[in-house]
Amino acid sequence: MNLIDGKKIAAQLRNKLKVEVDSIQKKFNRVPGLTVILIGDFAPSQIYVRNKEKSAKEIGLRSEIVKYPKDVQEKTVLNKIDELNKDDDVSGILVQLPLPDHIDKQKIIERINPEKDVDGFHPHNVGNLSSGYESSVPCTPLGCYLLIKEIEPNLSGKKAIVIGRSNLNGKPMAQLLLKENCTVTITHSKTKDLKNECNKGDIVIAAVGIPELVKGDWIKKDAIVIDVGINKTEKGIIGDVAFEEVSKVAKALTPVPGGVGPMTIACLLKNTIDCFKRSLK
Ligand code: NAD
C-alpha cells in the first residue's frame, strides 16, 4: 500500500508557489496578498488562521488578519469586505467560518468579490466550477484532487465514490472528478447500502465526520482512498476511514493526520496566487 504523504506533497507545492511568488515580485514589484477576517475567539479558528498567516508569509505573500470581537455588527464586517474588494493590494479574502449566529453566512460569502473569493464558496465560483469554467475551488477538495492526481494522473473512466455532500467538501469534490471524466457517485446520510456503493469505487473520498465509518470490506482491491475526516476521539485525532483494515486492501491511502490536512492550507496559498494572476488578465 502506498501511504499518501500529504505533508511532503504539500511542502513540494508550497516550494513551487514560493518560486512563483518570487518571480511575480521580480516582474511586477508587488506580491499577491491574502486577508483573513476572524470573528470571535473560537479556539480552532484562531489556530487555523494563525497557521494560514504563517504559511502565507513563508512563501512571501502579503498576509493580514482583521480581527473582530464575537458581538461585531454584521454591517461592520460587510463594510470591511467592501473596502477589501476595492483594495488592489488584496488578491484574496477569506472570512473564517463558523460565524456567530447573528451574522448571515450567505450574505457575507456573497459580498466578497468572486474574483477574490479564495475559499471558492461564492455562488459565482460554485457555478463556474460546475459549468467546467475557470474558478476558485474550495481548498480541501482541491487538495484531495491534487493528491489523487499524484497517484493516478489519468482518471478518465474511473469510478469515484464521494461520501458526503457538503458545499465545503463533497459537492466540489464530485465536480472536480467529473471534470476529469470520472463516473461519480455522491453518497450521503440517506444513501442505502453505502458499503455496496463504496465497493464499486476505484477512488473513494470520505468527507463525513464519523470516526472509522469506512471499513476494509467496503473497499475494492487497489482502490485509492482519501480520508478527509478529522474526528477528535479518545484515541486522538482519527479519520473517517478505518486505517489499518483499509490499508490492507487499498492501493493508496491518506493518513489522518498528515494526509489531506496539510494540502488544505497549501491550496489556499495556491488560490491566492491564482486570484492575483487572474486579476492581471
Ligand atoms: P458536513 O457535516 O457539512 O457534511 C457531512 C456529510 O456527511 C453530509 O453531507 C452528510 O449527508 C454525510 N453523512 C453523514 N452521516 C453519514 C453516513 N452515516 N453515511 C454517509 N454519509 C453521511 O461536514 P464537512 O464540513 O463536509 O466535513 C466532513 C469531515 O471533514 C469532518 O470530519 C471535518 O472535520 C473534516 N474536514 C477536514 C478538512 C481538512 O482540511 N482535512 C477540512 C474540512 C473538513
Image (cartoon, grey):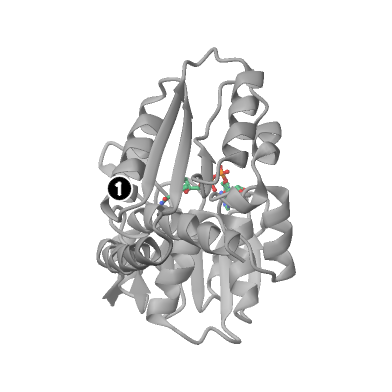
Q: What percent of the width, then of the height, locates residue 131?
A: 74, 68
Rendered residue at 61%/59% (across/down): 172
Residue neighbourhood size for the residue with mark 1, other residues' Cα within 10 Å, grouped as few (<14), some (14–19), many (≥20): some
Q: Can residue 183 be seen here?
A: no
Q: Is 79 displayed left or right of 64 in the figure? A: right
The residue lying furthest to the top in this view is 71
Instruction: Report which residue position mark 1 lands on.
Output: 57
Q: What percent of the width, then of the height, locates residue 221?
A: 42, 81
Answer above or below: position of 31 versus 145: above
Which quadrant would the C terminus be assigned to in this image?
bottom right
Q: Amino acid at mark 1?
A: Lys
Q: Nearer the viewer, residue 138 or 174?
A: 138
Q: What percent of the width, then of the height, locates residue 96?
A: 49, 35
Q: Nearer the viewer, residue 280 or 64?
A: 280
Q: Which image quarter: residue 12?
A: bottom left
Rendered residue at 59%/72% (across/down): 177
Q: What percent of the width, then of the height, locates residue 242?
A: 36, 58
Rendered residue at 50%/44% (across/down): 90
Rendered residue at 54%/75% (across/down): 201
